């Protein structure tokens, strides 16, 4: 009985801490319509808060999805032919839906997709969903495979403007409006949001740090990268995907660019208004655009995993990143395809979106040999 | 007990007594426009069908795949008398068939073809600014307002300027690429080549200004310019222009007639001392309250851009206000409140035009 009371007490204290954190994080939230113009990127924060990067609107939204029921399952997840199912719910065929991003709520393991009704036949080698349409539909898929829409008409949320985003109206080399890259990726870490994308500054590639809960303060840096394959320093190309990661007690942003430099930036270097030169750790091969990067544990070994538009998954052991070592600043040797950091290229084609599903599995969105799109999981630990 | 089960069964899975009809509501003035109407069920049947999720809507081509794993269309069912309306969360596709499936003792499957709704009317040039036909020889910008969104293609090959004897003026406009469209792709801004307008610059000396004083010109927007749906316009658009002397005077605020609202229901009106540039007027003048908050309202630019009227969204409240006038607003020749367009480049003066004039007024 004593033990029971003690555990009750623990439970109560636990709940209190949980509630306090939630209260604190959502203190400036209001209930109303979240007027998101394009769900360009999604990422989960704590307490089931979903962050949405809206390139068209130039804002970051924090949505309280009211989805905080703990799910400790270590099960896999599989859903075949996701596009036909989404199409059926939206009243269109499988080639008339686009999935723009995917995020898994780490608390509930519910899967969220940013979706639009648009012509998927317009996708191309360099043309991604955000280049074709604006995602305005948020779909939730539960572990049992059922699907529902999350209404944004009346939702508990807050938002913040991303300063100095690139103006619309100019066409990029990918035949898309540069504005679609205003926000290319967001990551949450310890009450900070790291927001990559294009600015209207002379050095267009920007990395912004926003406090969360949102306040008026956004720290703002522009980023330069040495592009080994292009043989030059670049300031225009946006970071495509990033992950905050601590090495040797110091926090870094690890980031991937198109064609495919992989770089590190010490967070301490990201001072307001400063132009930062990143360190090129590797060149993972031209003709490719990285899509997602996540950190996870394989057994006890921390690992990084990157998905790509035109390559299979790249796995990196972060222990192999030597933070003291000088970055790559010389052009790619003639005939070489990759250089720098040792990495694995994993089996499995057509994997675009990835996220951690649970302690044993990573969720993948993967084009199947029969042409359909499936949600699958990749086992990272055997229980 | 057996009876009870069969009664329950009957309640849950009714056999429908009435023939069902399914139709798409295509009348725009109907509150259920865009919905499907399912009629021929009685009230009890409707209640049972809706409470037990027995009615589902599918895109027919997916329904015909006969797969059990496809979710029905998202949307809302609304019961009214003997009718169920299904309002889809996202509109039905035109010229496609959808299936209504009602599960009772027997399964009712009805399909409905969504008609192709009338296409929006063909786009035309709705307005062209400046609205007046008499313009200064150093006219800087023109704005062409289309009645609907236009395509993304080249525009300059479709817009030509002719002098009185139908001679085409060579490259009068700066061919900015991509063209300067507003966000709705309906208003195009054309710049006369500033190099030809500014005195002492090579193009000016070489080719002269595109518009010559006392000349007569005709701007033609070809009907071949395509709209967002790829359709051409019904006819060419033409605007005649008569050219007066170059305007080398700045707009003068002191000569404006500003009529502050005498009563809370009246608009605020500004009569300028010359015709102004449509584009900069829209964004360059506004009203804020004492705390610096923008007063929401509608702007009307009238009298051929000689007058700016502001109608607040709500009647004016008592208090102090400021009429905010950006020094960047321009007349037809691109002269702003601080600087002539033609003036030699002086960094100081350019920066000066960043300011905003604050003209206080009070509603009593």
Image (tube, rainbow, N blue to C red):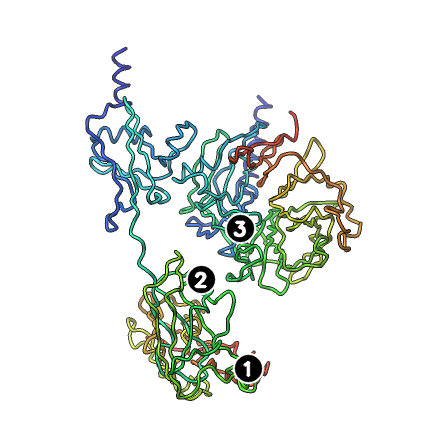
Q: Are discs 3 and 2 both within one chain?
A: no
Q: Nearer the viewer, mark 3 or mark 1?
A: 1
A150, B331: nearer the viewer? B331
Instruction: Using residue B317 as the reference point, say whether residue B184 is left or right of it.
Output: right
**Residue located at (39% from left, 56% from top):** B229
Numbered badge on residue B203: 1
Residue B297: % across, % down: 36, 67
Label 2 Cα neighbours within 10 Å, binned few <14 / some 14-19 / many ≥20: few
Instruction: Find the distance from the CA under tag 3 to the CA under tag 2.
Output: 20 Å
Q: Secondary structure at mark 1?
A: helix
Q: Nearer the viewer, mark 2 or mark 1?
A: 1
Chain of the residue that carries numbered disc 2 in the rendered image: B
- Residue B1 visible, this angle: no
Instruction: Find the distance from the CA under tag 3 to the CA under tag 1.
Output: 46 Å
- The answer to whether mark 3 and mark 1 are in CB contact below 8 A is no
Numbered badge on residue B183: 2
**Residue located at (28% from left, 40% from top):** B36
B219, B63: nearer the viewer? B219
Residue A82: % across, % down: 49, 35
B29, B153: nearer the viewer? B153
């Amino acid at each position: 009985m004593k033990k029971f009371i003690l555990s009750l007490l623990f439970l109560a204290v636990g709940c209190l801490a949980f509630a306090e954190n939630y209260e604190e994080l959502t203190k400036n939230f209001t209930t109303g319509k979240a007027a998101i113009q394009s769900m360009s990127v999604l990422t989960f924060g704590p307490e089931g808060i979903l962050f949405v990067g809206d390139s068209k609107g130039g804002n970051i939204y924090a949505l309280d999805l009211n989805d905080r029921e703990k799910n400790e399952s270590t099960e896999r997840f599989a859903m075949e032919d996701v596009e036909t199912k989404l199409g059926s719910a939206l009243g269109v065929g499988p080639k008339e839906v686009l999935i723009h991003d995917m995020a898994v709520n780490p608390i509930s393991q519910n899967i969220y997709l940013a979706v639009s009704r648009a012509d998927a036949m317009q996708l191309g080698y360099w043309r991604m969903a955000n280049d074709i349409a604006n995602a305005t539909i948020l779909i939730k898929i539960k572990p049992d495979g059922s699907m529902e829409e999350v209404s944004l008409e009346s939702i508990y949320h807050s938002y913040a403007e991303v300063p100095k985003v690139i103006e619309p109206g100019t066409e990029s080399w990918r035949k898309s409006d540069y504005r679609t890259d205003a926000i290319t990726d967001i990551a949450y870490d310890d009450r900070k949001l790291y927001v990559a994308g294009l600015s209207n500054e002379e050095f267009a590639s920007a990395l912004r740090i926003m406090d969360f809960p949102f306040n008026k303060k956004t720290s703002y840096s522009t980023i330069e990268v040495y592009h080994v394959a292009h043989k030059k320093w670049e300031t225009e190309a946006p970071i495509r995907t990033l992950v905050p990661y601590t090495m040797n007690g110091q926090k870094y942003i690890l980031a991937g660019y198109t064609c495919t430099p992989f770089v590190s930036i010490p967070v301490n270097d990201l001072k307001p208004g400063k132009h930062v030169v990143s360190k090129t750790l590797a060149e993972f091969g031209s003709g490719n655009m990285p899509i997602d990067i996540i950190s996870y544990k394989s057994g006890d070994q921390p690992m990084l995993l990157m998905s790509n538009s035109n390559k299979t998954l790249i796995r990196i052991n972060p222990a192999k990143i030597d933070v003291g070592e000088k970055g790559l600043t010389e052009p790619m040797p003639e005939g070489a395809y990759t250089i720098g950091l040792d990495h694995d290229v994993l089996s499995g084609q057509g994997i675009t979106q990835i996220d951690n599903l649970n302690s044993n599995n990573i969720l993948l969105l993967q084009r199947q040999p029969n042409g359909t799109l499936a949600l699958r999981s990749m086992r990272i630990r055997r229980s | 007990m057996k009876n009870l089960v069969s009664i329950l069964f009957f309640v849950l899975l009714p056999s429908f007594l009435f023939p069902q009809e399914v139709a798409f509501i295509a009348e725009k003035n109907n509150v259920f426009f865009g919905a499907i109407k399912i009629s021929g069920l009685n009230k009890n049947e409707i209640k049972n069908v809706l409470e037990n999720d027995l009615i589902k809507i599918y895109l027919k081509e997916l329904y015909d795949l006969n797969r059990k794993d496809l979710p029905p269309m998202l949307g809302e069912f609304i019961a009214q008398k003997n009718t169920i309306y299904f309002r889809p969360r996202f509109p039905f596709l035109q010229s496609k068939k959808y299936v209504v499936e009602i599960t009772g003792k027997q399964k009712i499957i009805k399909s409905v073809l969504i008609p192709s709704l009338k296409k929006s009317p063909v786009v035309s040039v709705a307005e062209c600014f400046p609205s007046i036909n008499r313009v200064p020889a150093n006219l800087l910008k023109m704005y062409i307002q289309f009645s609907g969104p236009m395509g993304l293609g080249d525009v300059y090959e479709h817009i030509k300027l002719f002098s009185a004897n139908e001679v085409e003026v060579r490259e009068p406009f700066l061919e900015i690429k991509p063209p300067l469209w507003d966000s709705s792709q309906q208003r195009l801004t054309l710049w006369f080549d500033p190099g030809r307008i500014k005195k002492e610059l090579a193009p000016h000396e070489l080719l002269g200004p595109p518009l010559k004083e006392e000349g007569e010109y005709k701007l033609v927007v070809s009907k071949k310019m395509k709209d967002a749906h790829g359709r051409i316009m019904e006819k060419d658009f033409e605007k005649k222009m008569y050219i007066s002397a170059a305007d080398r005077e700045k707009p003068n605020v002191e000569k404006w007639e500003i009529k502050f609202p005498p009563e809370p229901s009246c608009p605020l009106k500004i009569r300028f001392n010359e015709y102004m540039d449509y584009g900069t007027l829209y964004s360059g003048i506004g009203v804020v309250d004492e705390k610096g908050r923008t007063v929401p309202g509608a702007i009307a630019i009238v009298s051929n851009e000689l007058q700016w009227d502001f109608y607040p969204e709500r009647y004016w409240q008592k208090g102090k206000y400021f009429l905010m006038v950006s020094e960047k607003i321009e007349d037809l020749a691109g002269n702003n409140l601080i600087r002539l367009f033609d003036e030699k480049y002086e960094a100081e003066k350019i920066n000066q035009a960043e300011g905003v004039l604050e003209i206080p007024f009070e509603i009593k």
